Amino acid sequence: MTAIVVFIDQVDAPGKLHPIHHQLLTLARGAGEPVAVVAGPVGAELAAELGSYGVARVVHSGQAELADYLVAPKAELVAQAAAAVSAAAVLVDNSPQGKEIAARVGVALNAGVITDAVGVSNDGGALVAHKSVLAGSWTVDARATTAVSVISVKAHSVDAAPAPGAAVAAVERLEVAFSPASLGARITKRTPRESSGRPELEDARIVVAGGRGLDGDFGPVEELADVLGAAVGASRAATDAGWISHAAQVGQTGKKVSPQLYISVGISGAIQQKAGMQTSKVIVAVNKDSESPVFEIADFGIVGDLFKVLPQAVEEIKRRRA
Ligand SMILES: Cc1cc2nc3c(=O)[nH]c(=O)nc-3n(C[C@H](O)[C@H](O)[C@H](O)COP(=O)(O)OP(=O)(O)OC[C@H]3O[C@@H](n4cnc5c(N)ncnc54)[C@H](O)[C@@H]3O)c2cc1C
């Protein structure tokens, strides 16, 4: 059976799996035998949750270096654990940290690295990564020619599901030999970002994104996001205008999101915007211009003034929920 390592970071928020971990474990289970490699503690609750996703083998390290230094020690944990279990592939999330780990593990294991995958399958023992490219207009299958592949997977590309029969996860401790080079950048202070109370853009199942059409007023977008429990995103026109933080930008030079539902509001749908959201499962566009290119990719379109459409949508959602 092909051993597939799934990296699980428990350093900052220990105790429970994140939705992307459920998704990575579901993918790994479909393509081989998932082995969870955990940075941080593994308590009984976490081990049971891993078992419910079909993980029979967990390799972890709680060494202080994993929390005290930037990403490099985590990459060394993943590389050494992958070698110890003779993994054919390593799956990480597609966050900046995940992609840096992918690159470092690729170098350490002389493994091919594939980023931005939306799926993984096993073709006769070789792992194939599926990618959606050129602003979502093409699907590409990519395969590393090396013995080990390292693949970073976009959030919400697959629906996570527990295994039909839970496994009992055996937890092994790995003593990682950290190289001096990995201990070059020590973290001296952590300042948690102020929470908006909304989900993180890249993790959210629903994203409501606004563009230049909002004319500086993100209120209607935020209100709709809040009744739907959604994250708020934006086009570059909106972030460049200073109406919302650059962290909210979706697109080629912003975040890549793949939620179940993306509601695009007052955004024209330029190719650079599409590059960050076109793999969303369902796209709803609200735009007053019926010729706007955003309607070419929308599953549902509403031609109208967003300042009239959004408050009505909010009212109707609240009424149905009451
Ligand atoms: C190298 C490069 C990288 C880029 N990266 C990104 C990126 O990462 N993300 C990104 O988004 N862009 C990016 N851009 C910019 C991109 O090309 C577009 O300029 C940008 O996406 C346009 O933003 P917008 O759709 O909000 O604005 P516009 O194109 O001006 O569209 C505004 C839309 O709002 C509609 N509208 C106006 N008023 C209303 C109303 N009252 N009700 C309903 N609809 C209304 C209009 O009909 C129009 O369609 C990049 C550009 C370059 C060159």
Image: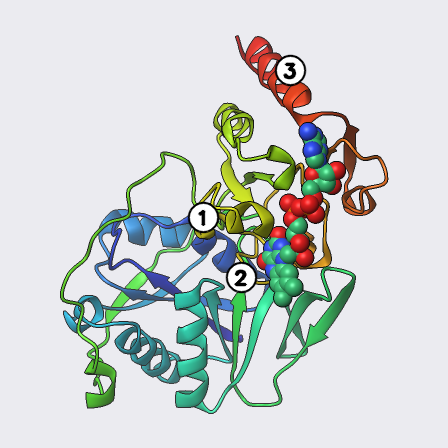
Q: Which residue is mark 1?
A: 19
Disc assigned to residue 222? none
Residue 168 seen from this side: yes
Disc assigned to residue 312? 3
Q: Amino acid at mark 1?
A: Pro
Q: Amino acid at mark 3?
A: Gln
- Local secondary structure at mark 3: helix
Q: Are marks 3 and 1 in contact (CB under 8 Å)?
A: no
Estimate how packed mark 2 is, as few (under 14), some (14 to 19) or many (20 or more) residues with alpha carbons within 10 Å. many
Q: Residue at x 72, y 45 (%)?
A: 268
CA gap between label 2 and label 3 equals 43 Å
Q: Residue at x 25, y 83 (%)?
A: 182
Of the image marks 2 and 1, the number of the one nearer the N terminus: 1
Lateral position of residue 219 relative to residue 77, left or right: right
Disc assigned to residue 29? 2
CA gap between label 2 and label 1 equals 15 Å
Q: Amino acid at mark 2?
A: Arg
Provide residue 152's location: percent of width, then percent of height. 52, 68
Of the image marks 2 and 3, the number of the one nearer the N terminus: 2
Q: Residue at x 62, y 13 (%)?
A: 316
